[in-house]
Image (cartoon, rainbow, N blue to C red):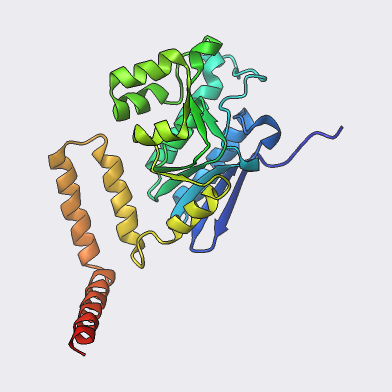
Amino acid sequence: MAEDVSPEILIERREGDVVLLTLNRPHARNTVSFTMWEQFSAALDRLETDTPARGLVLQGAGGYFSSGGDVKTGPARGDGAIRLAARLEMGQRIINRLRALPIPTIAAVEGGAYGIAWSIAMACDMIFAADDAKFGAPFLDYGLVPDGGAAWFLAQRLGRARAAEIMFSGRTLEAREVLDLGLVSRLLPAGGVVDQALDFAARIGGGNPHAVELTKRLLHAGETSDLAATQALELIYCHTCQAGEEVPRAREAFKARAAARKAAKEV
């Protein structure tokens, strides 16, 4: 049988200037390999150096997000001191770059997101999940520690006690529980998550891409800065937006709509 040489990451610029990035190993439940990380890095190179897209939607091929790291292949590469963690180190770099992208990012989760795939999803700004999707971090079942930042993401968002229960139990979480915990942005009917995410991303920001980019930068800075530092950035970014053409145009459009509503009431 011929070896499958399909790209493991697909990248496509869709209508509305939204990028759709697909984890493309459906034969292996989109588990992460060295090749996938390398191609993911190349895709991020393009996103970081091109004019910023309106948004990024990340999905898994075949209606399934990803089952995490590929346990059927070894995680080692080279002869370095931590060579057995070489694949993870690549993944950590990708996850950090994904979080820092200056565009809104949405993980569109159908099926399930397990292990480091859940970390990839949590690195996005939003998670849109199918109402039958499942999430889990069963690292201890494989004799491993949580990776990809899973312990950090969960502890930051849930507090230590809830994060610990998920980590130590290794249990699978149903979509409704994950929504109730505040770990996903929306639950949507299965089979339609990607289309909904693409539609949402295409409508972000109206006609002011600079404001979208600067808002993303504020969100990212807010996770590591105090209030005073974030407010200092707000001043700079607000000045930048006010100096452009979009704010006066939006203000005039608002005034025109208000005048039209008033005129309609007076008729």
Give residue 237's quadrant in the image: bottom left
Residue 6 position (above or below residue 247) = above
Q: Would residue 229 be visible to someone looking at this image?
A: yes
Find the residue positioned furthest to the left. 228
Picture coordinates of residue 93, whole percent (x, y): 46, 31
Picture coordinates of residue 48, whole percent (x, y): 45, 48
Q: Is residue 82 left or right of residue 39?
A: left
Picture coordinates of residue 154, whole percent (x, y): 36, 26
Picture coordinates of residue 35, whole percent (x, y): 63, 33
Residue at (37, 16) in percent of width and height? 165
| Figure disc tally | 0
Q: Which of 247 and 89 is in front in this view?
A: 247
Q: Nearer the viewer, residue 223 or 179?
A: 179
Residue 151 position (above or below residue 217) = above
Name the quarter where the N terminus is drawn: top right
Find the residue positioned furthest to the bottom. 267
Q: In this view, does 154 lie to the left or right of 14?
A: left
Residue at (49, 12) in percent of width and height? 140
Q: Is residue 256 left or right of residue 121?
A: left
Give residue 185's quadrant in the image: top left
Residue 43 position (above or below residue 75) = below
Residue at (20, 86) in percent of width and height? 263
Q: Nearer the viewer, residue 256 or 9?
A: 256
Q: Would residue 93 be visible to someone looking at this image?
A: no
Name the quarter where the C terminus is drawn: bottom left
Q: Which of 120 and 183 is in front in this view?
A: 183
Residue at (41, 36) in percent of width and height? 123
